[in-house]
Image (cartoon, grey):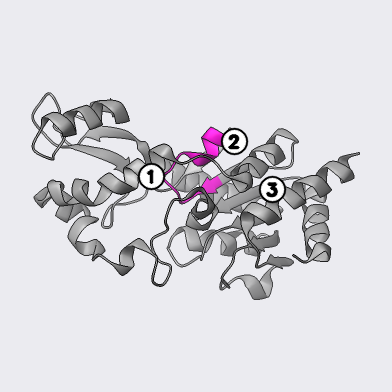
């Protein structure tokens, strides 16, 4: 761990007037939640997403989607926020973070205590009927899965779908617009655990840079934005972010 980089990141955050955080799957891996694109261990290494995770495949074969999602849903249900999630919630409580924009669907930021969270890809804890739009809790969906044919169905007979963005679906317009606005208006963007390979989230740092924002990146792998960042931390986020928290507390006096 580079203490000088940790200290510099903390100072930049402490001097910022409007910090926005962008998080990806890498922040939740320490909680035991697998990501999708890492070599060898990523979920898409072992299954074709076109078969199970497009909106068209969901409509045609929802049972394949639920068979694929069942173990992942159980992992997310049993997972707990890790020190990186907790650190971001602490930064917000201390007044250092305006919002957290996340590509994750695991609800970990909210469970850790973050209040202003913009979910670009939805939330796996929520579900709704694809026809009548009735909302269902995760417990209700599990009960209907157990009592059905591997497909949870609404009272109207249609299939219930988790409130997550599948391939071929647009991102929720309201959340995307808010994420773009926050990126335009921030003077610092902190990127945590994102490879910055999935659009349109990957373009948000570009928006921030165009508007003269500073950039701090914490990610184990390199990203396309590293060369333009003020600080790059290629460390475990669950270790780096709590160290930044301690520095922030020292700077706050």
Q: Is residue 241 magenta?
A: no
Taking depth in this image into account, of 89 and 17 the one nearest to the observer is 89
**Mark 2 element type:** loop
Q: Nearer the viewer, mark 1 or mark 2?
A: 1
Q: Is residue 154 left or right of residue 229?
A: left
Task: Residue at 68%, 42% (x, y): give it.
Answer: 97
> Horizontal placement of 180 versus 71: left or right?
right
Residue at image position (63%, 40%) is 86
Q: How many marks?
A: 3
Residues packed near mark 3 inside 10 Å, few (<14), some (14 to 19) or many (20 plus) = many
Q: Is residue 197 above or below residue 249?
A: below
Q: Which of marks 3 and 2 is nearer the N terminus?
A: 3
Which segment did they paint magenta?
101-114
The residue wearing badge 2 is 114
In depth, the one of 49 and 142 nearer the eye is 142
Q: In the picture, which quadrant includes the C terminus?
A: top right
> Under tag 1, what secondary structure?
helix
- Front-most of residues 36 and 58: 36
Q: Which residue is tagged 3?
A: 19
Quarter location, residue 76: top left
3 vs 1, front mark: 1
Name the residue beneath numbered marker 1.
75
């Amino acid at each position: 761990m580079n203490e000088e980089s940790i200290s510099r990141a903390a100072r930049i955050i402490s001097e910022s007037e409007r910090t926005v955080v962008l998080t990806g799957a890498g922040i939740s891996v320490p909680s035991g939640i697998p990501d999708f694109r890492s070599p060898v261990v990523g979920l898409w290494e072992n299954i074709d997403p076109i078969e199970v995770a497009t909106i068209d495949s969901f409509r045609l074969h929802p049972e394949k989607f639920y068979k694929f999602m069942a173990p992942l849903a159980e992992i997310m249900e049993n997972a707990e926020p890790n020190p990186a999630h907790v650190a971001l919630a602490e930064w917000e409580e201390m007044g250092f973070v305006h919002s957290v924009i996340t590509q994750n669907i695991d609800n970990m930021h909210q469970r850790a205590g973050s209040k202003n969270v913009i979910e670009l890809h939805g939330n796996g804890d929520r579900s709704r009927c694809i026809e009548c739009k009735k909302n269902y809790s995760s417990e209700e969906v599990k009960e209907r899965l157990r009592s059905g044919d591997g497909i949870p169905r609404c009272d109207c007979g249609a299939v219930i779908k988790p409130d997550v963005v599948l391939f071929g679906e647009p991102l929720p317009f309201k959340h995307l617009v808010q994420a773009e606005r926050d990126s335009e208006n921030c003077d610092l963007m902190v990127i945590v655990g994102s490879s910055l390979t999935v659009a349109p989230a990957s373009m948000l740092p570009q928006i921030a840079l165009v508007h003269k924002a500073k950039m701090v990146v914490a990610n184990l792998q390199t990203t396309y934005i590293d060369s333009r960042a003020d600080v790059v931390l290629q460390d475990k986020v669950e270790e780096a972010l709590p160290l930044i928290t301690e520095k922030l507390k020292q700077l706050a006096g």
